[in-house]
Image (tube, rainbow, N blue to C red):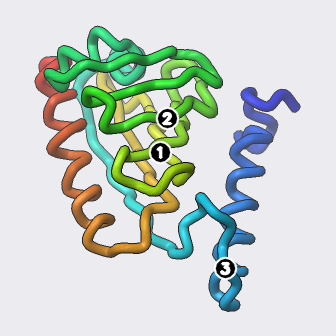
Amino acid sequence: MDVGKPGRDGLTRRSAIIGCAVAFGAIATARGATAPVGISNNAFAIHQEEFFPVEPKRVFDALLDARQFTKMTGLPAIIDPIVGGTFSLFNGVITGRTLELVPNSLIVQAWRDKVWPQGFFTIVRFELKAKGAGTLLVFDHTGLPQEAAEADSLARGWPEHYWRPLHDLLGG
């Protein structure tokens, strides 16, 4: 199976590896082991779903096109829209690397805030599902920092900094 192409079960090798790493890290943490540097020691995660009344391609493009993203947020963005490509969003506040892309349906990124410790990344997953004439965006953000307050702030930040501006950009 190719790393970036889904197999019969819909999983890619990369997503299976990431899933196993997260599961083993959670088991080790539950047993009191210290997680490796750069992997969160908790189970904080965010799951959100948002409907956009446009086709998945428009949502996909808006998330990966630097000009559209800059227009959406009002802050400079640099995005190399390929697997392995880096990005810098919100004038460098958020940086990372794209781990997986399935055109018009999936974006998986290693994502970090500049205030986090050096080398600390979380995983952000945007799954786009056609629903009628629109798109259901299923969003998961895993491996969040230990502080519950930060996880709560991030959970509030996604609608404020992504979903509402994305609706405004796409006209929905």
Name the N-terminal-most of marks 3 and 1: 3
In primary-sequence order, the first of circles 3 and 2 is 3
Say which amino acid is labelled 3. Thr
Q: Which residue is mark 3?
A: 34
Residue 39: x %, y % from top left: 60, 62
In the visual, does 140 lie left or right of 59? right
Please state, as top left, top right, bottom left or bottom right, where the N terminus lies in the image.
top right
Question: Does residue 170 appear to the left or right of 35 in the view shown?
Answer: left
Secondary-structure class at tag 1: strand
Residue at which label 1 appears: 124
Looking at the picture, which amino acid does disc 1 mark? Answer: Val
Foreground residue among 133 and 28: 28
- Counting residues from the start of the chain, the first of labels 1 and 2 encountered is 2
- Residue 35 image point, x, y percent: 66, 72
Look at the image and tell me whether residue 121 can be seen: no
Q: Residues within 10 Å of mark 2 (few under 14, many from 20)?
A: many
Query: What's the mark number on residue 96?
Result: 2
Quadrant (top left, top right, bottom left, bottom right) of the C terminus: top left
Residue drawn at the location 32% of the way across and 75% of the way down: 148
Furthest toward the top, the residue is 67
Q: Residue furthest bottom?
A: 31
**Alpha-carbon span between mark 3 and mark 2:** 24 Å
Q: Secondary structure at mark 2?
A: strand
- Figure quadrant of residue 28: bottom right
Residue occupying image coordinates x 21% and y 27%: 166
Q: Position of 47 compared to 21: left or right?
A: left
